[in-house]
């Protein structure tokens, strides 16, 4: 039996409120367009195990 590996992502807003959370499993075929969009406009700030946290950078 093969164990599925996953990555969890959390995105926080300007005041560090959680705005989006998702998990991606290794080998997953479906793309998460919201995840892709948020990764493009955020900065990484914390990693704990399989959890990555990002802060969305406000437009100025």
Image: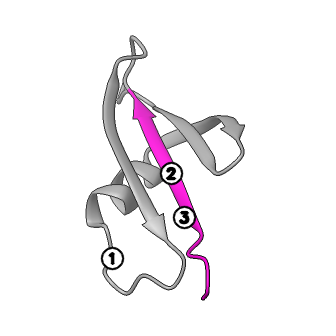
Q: Residue furthest top?
A: 15
State the image coordinates of residue 1 (x, y, percent, origin top left).
Answer: 60, 88
Q: Quadrant of residue 52?
A: top right
Residue located beneath label 1 in the image: 31
Colour convention: one colour
Q: Are marks 1 and 3 in contact (CB under 8 Å)?
A: no
Instruction: Count neighbours of disc 3 (C-alpha within 10 A) and say few if under 14, some if 14 to 19, many if 20 or more.
Output: some
Q: Vertically, is 60 above or below 51?
A: above
Q: Which residue is mark 2?
A: 8
Side of 32 where 24 appears, left or right? right
* Residue occupying image coordinates x 37% and y 87%: 29
Residue at figure coordinates x 31%, y 67% from the top left: 32
Callout 3 touching callout 2 (CB < 8 Å): yes
Q: CA distance from mark 3 to mark 2?
A: 7 Å
Residue 28: x and y, percent?
42, 82
The range drawn in magenta is 1-12
Q: Earlier in the sequence, mark 1 or mark 2?
A: 2
Which quadrant of the structure image shows residue 48?
top right
Q: Is residue 32 above or below residue 60?
A: below
Picture residue at 55% right of the left edge, 59% below the top: 7
Give the mark, 1 or 3, whose residue is nearer the N terminus.
3
60 w.r.t. 35: above or below = above
Query: Within the magenta stretch, is there residue 2?
Result: yes
């Amino acid at each position: 039996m093969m164990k599925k590996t996953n990555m969890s992502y959390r995105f926080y807003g300007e005041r560090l409120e959680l705005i989006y959370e998702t998990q991606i499993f290794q080998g997953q075929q479906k793309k998460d367009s919201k995840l892709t969009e948020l990764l493009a406009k955020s900065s990484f700030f914390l990693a704990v195990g399989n959890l990555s946290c990002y802060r969305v950078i406000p437009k100025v």
